Image (cartoon, rainbow, N blue to C red):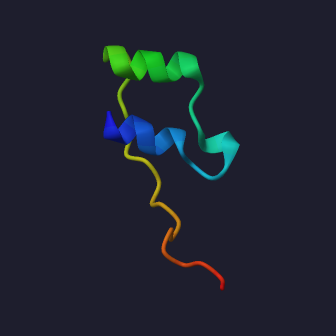
């Protein structure tokens, strides 16, 4: 479930799966690929 969650919080909307695909991943019908490396959440401009 964590891998699916990582897919769903991608910065670019085009990288996020559709709800149908998320459902298929949760059911085990579709393989869950490794999500892309996340951008640095720790780097913030102050």
Outermost residue, bottom side: 46
Quadrant where the C terminus is found in the figure: bottom right
Q: Position of residue 15 (x, y in %)?
A: 61, 43
**Is residue 13 shown above or below 23?**
below
**Is residue 36 shown above or below 18?**
below
Q: Position of residue 45 (x, y in %)?
A: 65, 82
Q: Please state if 45 lies on the left or on the right of 7 as rendered.
A: right
Outermost residue, front side: 46
**Is residue 23 shown above or below 42?**
above
Quadrant where the N terminus is found in the figure: top left
Q: Please state if 12 lies on the left or on the right of 39 as rendered.
A: right
Q: Position of residue 7 (x, y in %)?
A: 48, 41
Residue, x 43% and y 38% (percent of image)?
5
Residue, x 53% and y 66% (percent of image)?
39
Residue, x 43% and y 48% (percent of image)?
35
Residue, x 48% and y 23% (percent of image)?
22
Q: How many marks?
A: 0
């Amino acid at each position: 479930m964590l891998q699916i969650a990582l897919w769903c919080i991608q910065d670019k909307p085009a990288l996020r799966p559709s709800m149908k695909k998320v459902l298929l991943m949760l059911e085990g019908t579709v393989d869950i690929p490794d999500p892309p490396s996340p951008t640095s959440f720790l780097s913030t401009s102050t």
